[in-house]
Image (cartoon, rainbow, N blue to C red):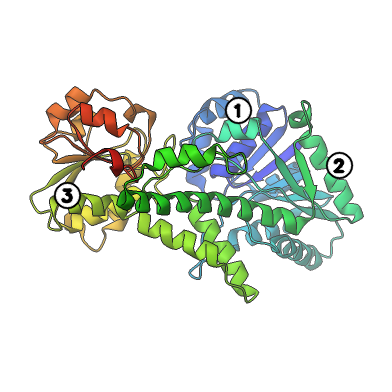
Amino acid sequence: MKITIIGTGYVGLVTGACLAELGNDVFCLDVDQRKIDILNNGGIPIHEPGLEEIVARNRAAGRIQFSTDIEASVKHGDVQFIAVGTPPDEDGSADLQYVVAAAKNIGKYMTNFKVVVDKSTVPVGTADRVSAAISAELGARSVTAEFSVVSNPEFLKEGAAVEDFMRPDRIVIGCDQTPQGEKARSQMKKLYAPFNRNHERTYWMDVRSAEFTKYAANAMLATRISFMNELANLADHVGADIEAVRHGIGSDPRIGHSFLYAGCGYGGSCFPKDVQALERTAQDYGLNLLILQAVEAVNARQKQVLGDKMQQRFGENLSGRHFAIWGLAFKPNTDDMRAASSRVLLGELLRAGATVAVYDPVSMQEAKRVLELDFYDAPELLASIRYAANPMDALVDADALAIVTEWKAFRSPDFDEVKARLKQPVVFDGRNLFEPTVMTELGIEYHGIGRSVLTNK
């Protein structure tokens, strides 16, 4: 099939590369010439395990191309995936300017039937706006050409996106019940047929329900995280172990174990943005989503918990203190720093007078860029950050180690070397990577999230 992907960001590039891997003829469009140059020169503009190899393999096979030529992109694909960014607007709603612009470009150049797929995460009703934008452009050209707008939200986890796309647990597709919608359904069924050979994974529904499903899924996952984080904070006070609690409640099949890990808050491009967008949609209809408001408030507070623990241990004034930070990205296997908990922690420590040495296996360059923006009003604080060459280098002369991202490389360090490099053996574990009893036996003062029952008593 001939496929056009509009946008070569995280969702677009993964979608395009994986569809090419299945044998389709894929045209990836982006208006950012820098991204296209990187891709045409054999690189990729994002970090995602396994993606670079798939892109290289399909470029060599001639199944995927990258260009800024809008007209050529519209002419190429019978199916046009809109996979552009939908950043939060000032009021928390999703900014749809790039989605609408993509729709206008399709309407400006299309001459035959097109299936237009909203792959970007968009609020309920976006398909109507996309349809109106295409129709307006066709009308301005006095051209009659049929099309159908489909909702096909993505469910990709950063760091595991290729695996998620190639082995999906579900495929959600929303089509309308017009003749054009039936043609679109037939095309989408053909496109996703390779994923349904073992068993049917596609959930067909109306367009608005498909749009809603994406937001509902992310809101539920964010809710589970904030729920456990709030319980973890209480566990620290009452003397319970949140990991034991997690196993206890997760064994109930109605609850399950997934997304019940306590930590120092969620981040990234999806959960914060999508929770806010769903709240904003509700406000447009005169409703208040009280649970989601609490989810967001708990998460904002949770990002301060690690810094609060460190100041409780070393004092509010951290002048003369030096700390090591392991992990900067919002989650492992990505360089994404959007809404990362590390940014909040660094702000707390630096503004309290501390210096820090930081290390992340992938996101060091992205962190430098982001932190320069974070501290634009206090550039002198940037001089208090040292970017370490490796995890152990970050520990030199540090008063304590704080772990913010659960990279696998951090799970089994040489604890004798950790103790030798730190000024004093103190670890603040923002992701509960280690067992408190083991740390105590090793002679390390350990501060986890919701695990104080076993240590420091």
Q: Quadrant of residue 376?
A: bottom left
Earlier-in-chain disc, 1 versus 2: 1
In the picture, measured across the screen, residue 317 lies left or right of residue 408, that is left
Task: Give the CA distance from mark 3 to mark 2.
Answer: 62 Å
311 or 360, which is in the foreground?
Answer: 311
Q: Amino acid at mark 3?
A: Arg
- Residue 32 in view here: yes
| Residue drawn where x is 81% and y is 52% of the image | 175
Query: Is the C-beta separation of discs 1 and 3 under 8 Å?
Result: no
* Marks 3 and 2, the one that precedes in the sequence: 2
Identify the image quadrant of the C terminus: top left
Q: Nearer the viewer, residue 3 or 210?
A: 210
Relative horizontal placement of residue 282, taking residue 242 as reference (left or right): right
Q: Which mark is residue 313?
A: 3
- Dot 1 falls on a residue whose secondary structure is helix
Q: Which residue is mark 1?
A: 59
Q: Which kind of residue does numbered mark 2 sit on?
A: Ser
- Residue 308, given in percent of the width and then of the height, sits at 25, 54
Task: State the residue lying farthest toward the left.
Answer: 320
Of 449 and 382, the residue lying toward us: 449
Image point (52%, 54%), residue name = 223
The residue that disc 2 covers is: 186
Calculate the distance from the C-alpha at mark 1 to the C-alpha at mark 2: 28 Å
- Badge 3 crowding class, 10 Å Cα cut-off, few under 14, some 14 to 19, many 20 or more, is few
As drawn, 342 above or below 301 = above
Alpha carbon of mark 1 to alpha carbon of mark 3: how far?
A: 54 Å
